[in-house]
Image (tube, grey):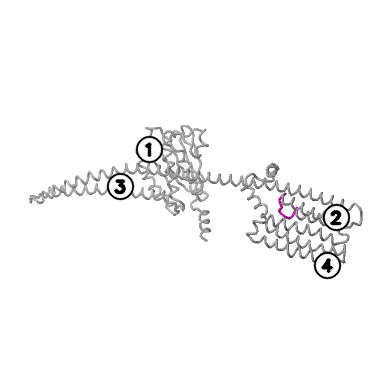
Amino acid sequence: MHPLLIKLGLRFEQPADERDFVRHFTLDDLGRTRAAMLLGAFVYCAFSVWDWILDPAVWTTTLAIRLAVAGFVLLPLTAALGSRPAQSWAEPIYLAYCAVPGCVLSLIYLRLEPGFDHAAAGMIIVILFVSTLLPLRLTSLAAFCVLTWTCFALCESFAVHERAGMRFVNNFEIGMAYALSLYAVGAREVRARRQFQTERALRREMERSERALAELRDAQAHLVQAEKLASLGQLVAGVAHEINTPLGLALTTSTAVEGDLRRLVATVESGQVRRSDLTQAIARLREGMGLLFANLTRAADLVTSFKQVAVDQANEERRSFELRPWLHELMSTLGPLLRRKGHALRIACEDAVILDSYPGALAQVISNLALNAVIHGFPEGHAGHLDLSVSRTEEGGLRLVFRDDGVGIPADQLQKVFEPFFTTRRDQGSTGLGLHIVFNLVVSKLQGRIELASGTGTGTRFTITLPLTLERVREREERATL
């Protein structure tokens, strides 16, 4: 039997799928189903008016039968479905709810003297209710049909008909009603099973897509972090190289000062101190201390600037800051790397520009643009110029223009430079995420826009437009804290 049902689309091959479908099919929209069951109980009792018209003599008996069926079967079964343990037996409950009144209806017609002359209409109403308002599957409906038709035929065999041929008419009408209801319920179940399969397939595909997206985001986060660390590592190397110069001079100076001090001490201890020797020694010590102080101050300034830039890049917090001194701090960390390559960097920024934004994200953007220009804009051994100009816009925003006079970008690559993993230097370790990170930070984090203009041999220009204050971000943060 099961293979036939599977072939007809009325059963799933996997038992677990079948159980899940039956539970979903029978309990979906349970509130509406229970309301329909209450309506069915009321209609079943209301047809006692029909009994009274057909045979007033036995009306009280048939009313009592109907009320008993409603009170002891229909209403208790309806109430039982409100209990979670009973819901696992939902389909047998539906079958009992339909079969008991359907069979008892034939007994009521047997009590009414002309009952079976009008029995087909009552049975058809019951069949219509069962097939349209209750979530019965085809197998359960077939069981209902067998039970109620058998009881009807048995009771009808004891009935006395006023008109000949009524038995054939009744069974023909009821049989056709059964056939139509079986087809309708079967078609409904097949559609429900297909929809159930589709929904499960979509759910599995969505879960698989979400897992793949999560894995992709994790991988992208690791790559982005690696790119950030790589750019920060290049800054560290450049700053370390720059710091070595003042520290080396300070070390040499301190050694010379120490020698002069030893000689001065020896002269003083000998007791033969001449004024000219003392004056000369003090002058050399003063000069040495000045050089020592100047070089150590230079090294300290470099460390302070680099620390601020590193903290900004590692920190995702938003703050207000004056742009011009902040840019000079940032470029002081980029300067060593650029000068080591022979490049010249020029900064032009208006005074008193206060930006309320994310300095870490902006530092990452400018650093990536500078490093990208150094790596891709100039062939090895060729030096060039990098310009960064900042000005206010007429709309009250901020415009940053970063340009270089390097080799430029071919026209066929202009539409690809912001795509993730696009690079022309993969053999040299480039990941193709630098400008992709720049685009994402400008658009999503800094709430701005970025435009690119370039051509072969004409250099490259990035124009970034930003709001001075991230009003929308601030509003979202305020709403989130409420």
Question: For residue 157, which numbered disc appears in the image?
Answer: 2
Q: Position of residue 133 (x, y in %)?
A: 74, 55
Q: Position of residue 59 (x, y in %)?
A: 84, 66
Q: Earlier in the sequence, mark 1 or mark 3?
A: 3
Query: Could you tell me how far apart the alpha carbons at marks 1 and 2 are, in whole angstroms?
Result: 110 Å
Which kind of residue does numbered mark 4 sit on? Answer: Thr
Q: Is residue 119 magenta?
A: no
Give SS at disc 1: loop
Q: Earlier in the sequence, mark 2 or mark 4?
A: 4
Which kind of residue does numbered mark 2 sit on? Answer: Ser
Question: Is the residue under label 3 in contact with that under label 2 (CB below 8 Å)?
Answer: no
The residue tagged 4 is 60
Which kind of residue does numbered mark 3 sit on? Answer: Ala
The residue tagged 1 is 343
Question: Is the residue under label 4 in contact with that under label 2 (CB below 8 Å)?
Answer: no
Q: Is residue 211 left or right of residue 16?
A: left
Which kind of residue does numbered mark 1 sit on? Answer: His
Q: Position of residue 155 (x, y in %)?
A: 83, 57
User: Of discs 1 and 3, which sits in the foreground?
Assistant: 3
Magenta stretch: give its range. 131-138
Query: Could you tell me how far apart the alpha carbons at marks 2 and 3 are, in whole angstroms?
Result: 113 Å
Query: Could you tell me how far apart the alpha carbons at marks 1 and 3 are, in whole angstroms?
Result: 21 Å
The residue tagged 3 is 299
Query: Could you tell me how far apart the alpha carbons at marks 3 and 4 are, in whole angstroms?
Result: 109 Å
Question: Is the residue under label 3 in contact with that under label 1 (CB below 8 Å)?
Answer: no
